[in-house]
Image: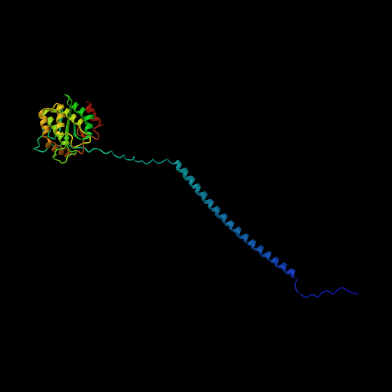
Amino acid sequence: MVGYPAAAPATGQANPGMASLRSAVSSVRALTIASLALLVIVAGGLVVGVASLRAQVDTLSQQVTELTAAAAQAAAAPAPAAAAVPAPEQAAEPQTPQLGAAGELPDGVSVPPGFDTTGAVLLGDPAAADVVEVYIDYQCPFCQRWEQEVGAALVDRALQPGSGLLVKQYNLAFLQETSPDLQPAGASARAASAAACVLEEDGVEVFATFNTAVFAAADPSEPPTQFMADALSTLARESGASEAAIACIEAEEHVPFVATSTQSGFGRGVGGTPTVIVNGRTLDNPFTDGDLLTLAAG
């Protein structure tokens, strides 16, 4: 009879399955311990972060409280007086230099009748309270405008009996002239000399008419050939001048006087024409000055 085989005898070696299980258990235990340690570290960091954030919040809260209190205190305090802010200075408009009194012409200068010793034509009352001084050049376009808009009316007013107005006209000659002594005489010098001839020979009434006629005939382009002797003589005759005045005009008799009078005007500070002075005040604009226009209107 066949029996069952006999059992194998024990060899004394560990079971391989149990060893593997033990190793796995050890790994799980180590991983669990590491995880717990990590959790402890993270939790500690969170605690520290929360504490720091709370401290910052407390600080900000305190600052807000302080600022709120300061704002409330400032609102309750009276507002300080505003500092006065100086107004910006306005640019001063340029002013015409004020001229001093006219100087007398040098000794030895032959002054034609009708002029004073400063070289001015006297038109009106020599003792008048209101005195208007005018510097002109017969070639000056602005002087031509002056005569048309103000000058003729001003002289007419001055020549009225009892006007209380004196016009002192200085006839300069410098436009297109070639030398201070006006030799040879140019257009301005010839016209100014002719005006002196008319005044000397025929008086202020004829002079005033001739003065206006010369300005009316002037060429604004200022050609040096204008105001030749024949043209000036014709204007003089049409204005009522005598033959003695015509002879004086043709001889250019008063050119030296005009040269001296012109230099005297420059010495006074006259820088251009027309220059107008009313009772010692040099005008910025002789075409719009209220005092002057009132005097001209009477």
Residue 293: image location, x then y, percent: 24, 29
Using the image as rendered, state which of residue 283 and residue 159 is in the foreground. Answer: 159
Is residue 58 depicted above or below 102 in this figure?
below
Which residue is located at x 66 percent, y 63 percent? 31
Marks counted in the figure total 0
The image quarter in which residue 14 lies: bottom right
Q: In the drawing, does residue 36 fall left or right of residue 162?
A: right
Q: Can residue 197 be seen in this view?
A: yes
Instruction: State whether residue 3 is above or below residue 94.
Output: below
* Residue 207 or residue 29, whichever sits in front: 207
Which color mode does the image show?
A: rainbow
**Residue 87 as seen in the image, left or right of residue 214:** right
Q: In which quarter of the image is residue 172?
A: top left
State the image quarter where residue 284 is shown: top left
Q: Is residue 130 visible?
A: no
Q: Which residue is drawn at 55% across and 53% down?
A: 53
Left or right: 52 in relation to 286: right
Can you say whether 10 is above or below 97 in the image? below
Query: Between 126 and 36, which is closer to the camera in this rendering?
Result: 126
Residue 1 in the image, given as x and y percentages of width and height: 91, 75
Residue toward you, 141 or 131 = 141
Screen quadrant of the C terminus:
top left
**Residue 102, image x and y in percent?**
16, 36
